[in-house]
Image: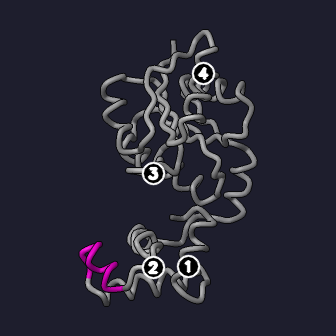
Amino acid sequence: MIHVLIADDQDLVRGGLAALLDLEADIEVVAQVGRGDLVEAAAAEHLPDVILLDIEMPGMSGLEVAERLRGHRVVIVTTFGRPGYFSRALDAGVAGFVVKDAPAAQLAAAVRRVMAGERVIDPKLALSASAVGPSPLTQREREVLRTARDGSTVAGIARRLFLTEGTVRNYLSSAIGKTGARNRAEAVHVAESRGWL
């Protein structure tokens, strides 16, 4: 029996995935959580063989959770098939990346293949990721852009990230240049649309 933990912030989606997987004779959903920051505790308590993660969740993103769960069999299951997300997921060591519009049988097969030690990647996503290429942003540039998403001032970003205003300006300038944007709002938009944030 393959024990699975599902993390998705949408109750209907999470319940649907669980119901579909529970129909499989060799798969049992042992836990479900709706927030990224609850996954580690649930994994420690329920000891799943495979963890299915959505990307965009409150508390902590699925990509951040995947980075913290290195060594576990993690499959990203998302509607956001952005190439940058795919690259970051691979960097985090995930065992699979499946988009939610895949047939249910494909998800069950992915769980089995990951359990068998294979890496399962949506082929269309792999192709588009190779066309876009990896993110040119450093981790700190991504962090500054993520913090700038809400329109915070340079001083506000500096306070939240414990950086000097000059350092924040440097990171923003570098990120703007690397994304080919004209300003930081556009840089945030470009980075988000490519899945780099």
Residue 48, quarter of the rendered image: top left
- Sequence order check: which comes first, mark 3 or mark 1? 3
Q: Which is in the foreground here, disc 3 or disc 4? A: 4
Residue 25 numbered mark, or none: none
Residue 61 numbered mark, or none: 3
Q: Measuring from the top left, give residue 38's x and y in whole percent.
A: 35, 39
Q: Is residue 174 magenta?
A: no
Q: Residues within 10 Å of mark 2 (few under 14, many from 20)?
A: few
Q: Which residue is mark 4?
A: 19
Q: What amino acid is found at the position of numbered circle 1 in the picture?
A: Ala
Q: CA distance from mark 2 to mark 4?
A: 40 Å
Residue 101, quarter of the rendered image: top right
Magenta segment's dominant SS is: helix
- Sequence order check: which comes first, mark 1 or mark 2? 2
Q: Measuring from the top left, give residue 57's x and y in whole percent.
A: 47, 48
Q: CA distance from mark 1 to mark 4?
A: 40 Å
Q: Which residue is mark 2?
A: 151
Q: Which is in the foreground here, disc 1 or disc 2? A: 2
Coloring applied to the structure: one colour
Q: What amino acid is found at the position of numbered circle 4 in the picture?
A: Ala
Query: Of helix, strand and loop, which one carries label 3?
Result: loop
Q: Residues within 10 Å of mark 4 (few under 14, many from 20)?
A: few
